[in-house]
Image (cartoon, rainbow, N blue to C red):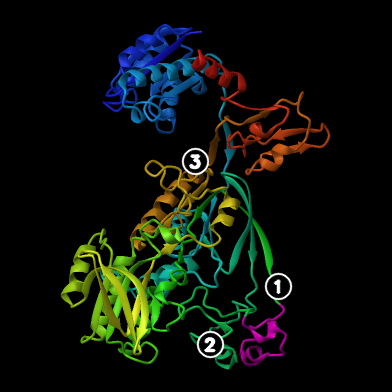
Amino acid sequence: MKIGVYVCHCGINIAATVDVKAVAEYAKTLPNVVVAKDYVFMCSDPGQDMIKEDIEELGLDRVVVASCSPRMHEPTFRKAVQTKGMNAFLFEQANIREHCSWVHEDREKATEKAKALVSAAVAKATLLKPLEVMEADVEPSALVIGGGIAGIHAAIDSANAGYKTYLLERDPSIGGHVAEMCKIFPKMNRAACLLVPKMTEVLTHPNITVLSYSELLDVGGFIGNFDVKIRKKPRYVDPEKCTACGECAKVCPVKTDDGKAAIDMPYPFAVPRTYTINPELCLRFQGEDCTKCKDVCPEGAVDFEEKEVEEEIRIGTIVVATGYDEFDASLKPELRYDMYDNVITGVEFEKILLEAEKTGELKVNGKEPKDVIFIQCVGSRDKNVGNEYCSRVCCMYTAKQATMVKDLVPDSNVTVCYIDVRAYGRGYEQFYENAQKKGVRYWRGNAAEVYKDNGKLVVRAENTMLGDPKELSADLVVLATGMTPKSDARDLGNLLKVPQSADRFFLEAHPKLGPVNTASDGVYIAGTCQGPKDIADSISQASGAVMKALIPLCQGKVLIEPITSVVNEEICSGCRMCEKICVYDAPTFDEERGVMTINSVVCKGCGSCGATCPSGAISMNHFRDQQIFAQINMLST
């Protein structure tokens, strides 16, 4: 056996803390090592060429590179050794950057640790076995989960590429949060003018099937061949017959606080443009004999007997664009959101502004507000509620709403209580400055409490510039609530095998190198389900996610890495503990032989089954017990 060891300087990332040349010299003394070299950047073309030349000239059959994280450059070096006929899985990488130079200051100790890591990598390389990558065919279709602005653009991009695309939305209409907005910063375009054409394009696109008012029940299979089960909830109104005349809503005896009937449409430009009965509000579903909507419908579209339908489809890739929830302002009781009807959230105020744009008058609870205070960072950058992140859009939508108040009520006093103003996008700083030029007053204060005094709201806050407390009176207080993950994000994540980060948004594979990829192959994330962002960034990420999702669809095949679990049937007792622990459903029980088998295509090589197996019958390709023990033995000597 002939092993080559190559130690990378990584510029000064490693060389500044580790004596790279000393590590290379040490590697020459290790068993089976015939060559050991160091180079400033092993991942560069000259560095890779050095490895290729030594494989050809010295007949190397194993290669070890001591450099950065395998997550970054293991594929690079695998491809390099493959070009010279070596099996890619006969390559081993030692991480002496993240595990050594970046976490130590003592050069001598860091160098000794680097030597130990290299010796362990060489010990494992000695026992490596060739593995072959598997191939699987791909179903040429995609599923986009979430019908908001990111999901809509993702579906259109996928369909325009020529692939069958399913757009799944659990609400009666697609459109998401943007459909409820009045105007969009910084150009102050009407939200509907930008959104409606896209919604119509989705509905009429020959490659898109809109599955609105539907939920994801189950996901099986693997990249290229996902088996998806969907539940279509009953609308109790036939979309093919409904003409959206609105007669049913007029006669409905049930009305919510915002004027919605038990049978209604989310908004006039809903897609699909059909009414839906809310069974939680409808008297018919509460045991009363009410049929007014059915009696008045000229098309006979109302059907109280409609049942839910389950459908199974096979798709190749999945894009998750499920969006966000608005922060629950009642979790900040000191702001009295639940107590006073003139303390409202930014989302609620958006609907008021939408109506004000139509009438030309701004009215809240029937009165025109003269003193309006906006409180920033409600539910964001707040450790007390568990949201330490910035929601990114609140500063700008507050500036937009404050500007609109000044336009509608020129003599109003508008104050923004802010912690910091984060106007990070193109044109955002100018928009913020224009709001001030219109008379919007920005006051750097951390709001502590809202209460009433003689019928007027009073905001008690601390001036964080001077450290002085201050009280501001107002007719209306608007809370700039931030973004939070969807309430059912964990359930969806479990279905798709996509983890959440500490902030509970879906976790990307890598913040820099894989911002739309996930730990589950074939599943990609876009928009605010991955973290707070504005419309432009959500659309950009949606296009990026679709581009990644289209790669396996275009290729028609996917490569399945062979680093999977393997069952030693001679000692397997068939206890099925591995079956219970695996989140990917890779192990299955063979009834005839009484042993477990592993679906190598589904297995992700996480190792949970091997750690659980009481008889030690399960091991991991490329991480077999004897390979790990060899590393441990080298480190302990």
Please name which of the two marks, 3 or 1, marks the residue nearer to the observer. Answer: 1
| Residue 600 vs residue 567, the one in the foreground | 567
Mark with earlier residue (3, 1): 1
Q: Is residue 476 above or below residue 179?
A: below
Task: Name the spot of residue 444 as percent of width and height, x first.
Answer: 24, 67
Give the distance between the C-alpha atoms of the residues marked 2 and 1, in whole angstroms: 24 Å
Q: Secondary structure at mark 3?
A: helix
Q: Which residue, given by chain and number where applicable, does mark 3 sit on?
A: 555
Please name which of the two marks, 2 or 3, marks the residue nearer to the observer. Answer: 2
Residue 2's tag is none
Give the distance between the C-alpha atoms of the residues marked 2 and 3, in whole angstroms: 47 Å
- Residue at horizontal 74 percent and vertical 34 percent from the top: 596
Q: Which residue, given by chain and number where applicable, does mark 1 sit on?
A: 307
Task: Name the spot of residue 437 as percent of width and height, x first.
Answer: 16, 74
For badge 1, the amino acid type reads: Lys
Q: Quadrant of residue 254?
A: bottom right
The answer to whether residue 563 is seen in the rendering is yes
Q: Which residue, given by chain and number where applicable, does mark 2 sit on?
A: 245
Numbered marks: total = 3
The range drawn in magenta is 281-305
